[in-house]
Amino acid sequence: MVAALVTAVLNYALGAMLGRQAVTSLAGSRINRISQWLSNRGVVAVATLRVLPVAPFIIVNLVAGAVHIRFRNYFWGSVIGMIPGTLAIAVFADSLLAVILDPNWTGAGILAGVTGAVVGGALVVRRWLRARAARSGDREATLG
């Protein structure tokens, strides 16, 4: 997680140095939707973008820097948003290694359960965000 945060911060700084025009040429048309959504929501927006795979990691970082999202909001949103994925990877990797080293039904069941929980959690969050956007009439809330 520390390495991902360092990469995120460096890409944020690069986006800030390059500016909006240069990042637009790199990121394409999605930058306008992402930047508008980020600027209106702060920490929650960044955390949501980290949890949901809406845009590539580097694009989110560059755009956040280029549109001058407050660094504090960007950093803490990134930390909060990366925690679930980092925990899932740690648990998933441990279960996967256990199943590979000592194949058994218990290990395979745990691995399947963890995988199901991660996928199910992502689907629940995605559905919740779409329902929230529909209630508020905010088409851009789900970036797409």
Image (cartoon, helix red, strand yellow):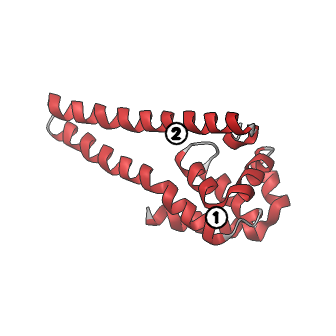
Q: How crowded is mark 1: few (under 14 residues within 10 Å), some or many (20 or more)?
A: many
Q: Quadrant of the N terminus?
A: bottom left
**Residue 64 on image: x %, y %:** 70, 60
**Residue ID at (53%, 68%):** 6
Q: Mark 1 points at which residue?
A: 11
**Residue ID at (16%, 32%):** 106
Circle 1 SS class: helix
* Residue 110 horizontal side relative to residue 67, left or right: left
Q: Nearer the viewer, residue 34 or 40?
A: 40
Q: Nearer the viewer, residue 109 or 14?
A: 109
**Residue 30 on image: x %, y %:** 76, 44
Tell me the distance, in whole angstroms, between the alpha carbons under discs 1 and 2: 26 Å
What is the three-letter code of the residue carrying label 1?
Asn
What is the three-letter code of the residue carrying label 2?
Val
* Residue 24 horizontal side relative to residue 46, left or right: right
Q: Which of 95 and 36 is in front in this view?
A: 36
Q: Name the residue at the top extreme.
A: 105
Q: Foreground mark, 1 or 2?
A: 2
Up/down of 83 relative to 33, above or below: below
Q: Name the residue under label 2.
A: 125
For the residues labelled 1 and 2, say whether their Cβ atoms are less than 8 Å apart.
no
Which of the two discs, 1 and 2, labels the residue nearer the N terminus? Answer: 1
* Residue 9 horizontal side relative to residue 99, left or right: right
**Residue ID at (64%, 45%):** 55
Which disc number belongs to residue 51?
A: none
Q: Name the residue at the front extreme.
A: 135
**Residue ID at (68%, 35%):** 135
Circle 2 SS class: helix
Q: Name the residue at the right extreme.
A: 21
